């Protein structure tokens, strides 16, 4: 299954998040990529392991594709060996949950959290989600503290 890029939905209404997030996944697509059931993905929303949105007039929830990482790269500071071809597994970016909780505690809505994660932060020199994917969890959390 392939992700839906903002350009692929040119005939649908756009949201401001479409300009920030390059690719979205539906809940069933996330479940397939994680090798789990859609109910488990909804549980990840409930436990704040992941956030999503209804960008551009979609009826269903969408999750930024960048929130998923290859399992062997889940710990960017200590990546594991690459799996054999055909045995790749993806996981939710582990450092995302604490960051989401921190941003939620600062009063941000899910849409605002997604926007913050995909907006270039001058202190980080990149977007917070890219910094998290590179293993810079502490720097991202310090940047998030400035929102309080």
Image (cartoon, rainbow, N blue to C red):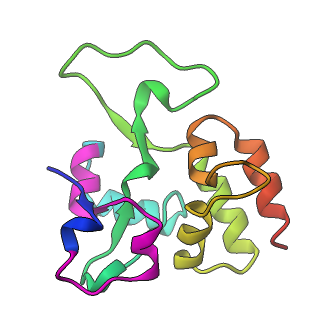
Q: Is residue 24 left or right of residue 104?
A: left
Number of disc labels: 0
Q: Where the C terminus falls, by quadrant?
A: bottom right
Q: Nearer the viewer, residue 37 or 97?
A: 97
Q: Is residue 50 left or right of residue 35?
A: right
The spot of residue 76 in percent (x, y) is: 58, 28
- Residue drawn at (78%, 45%), measured in percent from left and top? 139
Q: Nearer the viewer, residue 26 or 7?
A: 7
Q: Is residue 93 magenta?
A: no
- Residue drawn at (60%, 64%), measured in percent from left and top? 119
Q: Is residue 13 left or right of residue 20?
A: left
Vertical side of 66 occupied by 28: above or below: below
Magenta part of the protein: which range?
Answer: 10-33
> Residue 14: which quarter of the image?
bottom left
Q: Nearer the viewer, residue 47 or 72?
A: 72
The spot of residue 54 in percent (x, y) is: 35, 80
Q: Nearer the viewer, residue 69 or 115?
A: 115
The spot of residue 19 in percent (x, y) is: 43, 71
Vertical side of 1 occupied by 43: above or below: below
Q: Is residue 75 left or right of residue 123?
A: left
């Amino acid at each position: 299954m392939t992700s839906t890029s903002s350009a692929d939905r040119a005939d649908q209404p756009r949201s401001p998040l479409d300009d920030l997030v390059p690719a979205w996944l539906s809940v069933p697509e996330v479940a397939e990529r994680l090798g789990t059931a859609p109910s488990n993905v909804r549980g990840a929303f409930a436990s704040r392991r992941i956030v999503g949105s209804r960008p551009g007039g979609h009826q269903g929830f969408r999750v930024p594709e960048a929130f998923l990482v290859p399992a062997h790269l889940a710990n960017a500071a200590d990546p594991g060996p690459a799996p054999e071809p055909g045995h790749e597994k993806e996981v939710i970016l582990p450092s995302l949950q604490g960051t989401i909780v921190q941003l939620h505690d600062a009063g941000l809505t899910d849409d605002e959290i997604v926007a913050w994660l995909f907006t270039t932060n001058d202190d980080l020199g990149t977007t917070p989600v890219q910094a998290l994917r590179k293993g810079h969890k502490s720097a991202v959390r310090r940047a998030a503290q400035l929102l309080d």
